[in-house]
Each structure stands twice: as structure tokens, then as C-alpha cells.
Amino acid sequence: MYYSMRMRVKTVKESEYNELKKKAELNEDLLTQLVSGLEDIKAGRIKPWKRTTNRSSS
């Protein structure tokens, strides 16, 4: 089966474009941190995780 990829052009406000651009940069940074963390775990460079709870009971 053949699928054609057609490009579409969408006009957005500059403020919306800048917001989307910031989110894309943040996503890339978070992905880089995640990969780095997984590599640390794989190499054994981890400390035991201590779970802290600062929640108050309702």
C-alpha cells in the first residue's frame, strides 16, 4: 500500500509559535535527561532512592 505524505501549511500567531517552540525544546531536554539517567542506571551509577512524602492527610 502506498501512502502519500502531503505537506500542509498552517498559519498560527507568533505567540503560539513561540510557545510551541519552547515546549519542543523542553521535550528535547527532558528526553536527553531521561536517556542520560537510563545510561547511568545501566552502568550502575545510581544511589538508592528514598521516597519522601510531604503530603498532609485530609
Image (cartoon, rainbow, N blue to C red):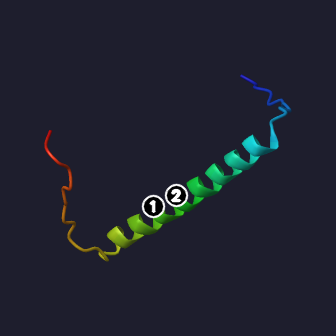
Residue 34, numbered label = 1
Vertical arrangement, residue 46 with respect to residue 11, above or below = below
**Measuring 20% from the left and 50% from the top, which residue is drawn there?**
55
Q: Is residue 52 left or right of residue 10?
A: left
Identity, as a three-letter code, of the amino acid under mark 1: Leu
Q: Is residue 8 left or right of residue 3?
A: right
In the rendered image, which quarter is residue 1 located in? top right
Q: Which residue is mark 2?
A: 31
Number of numbered discs visible in the structure rendering: 2
Q: Is residue 7 left or right of residue 52?
A: right
Question: How far across and down, in percent of the image, does residue 57 sit?
Answer: 13, 43
Q: Residues within 10 Å of mark 2 (few under 14, many from 20)?
A: few
In the rendered image, which quarter is residue 48 located in? bottom left
Secondary structure under tag 2 reads helix
Vertical arrangement, residue 23 with respect to residue 43, above or below = above
Q: Is residue 6 left or right of residue 55?
A: right
Question: How far across and down, in percent of the image, does residue 49 sit?
Answer: 22, 66
Q: Residue furthest left?
A: 57
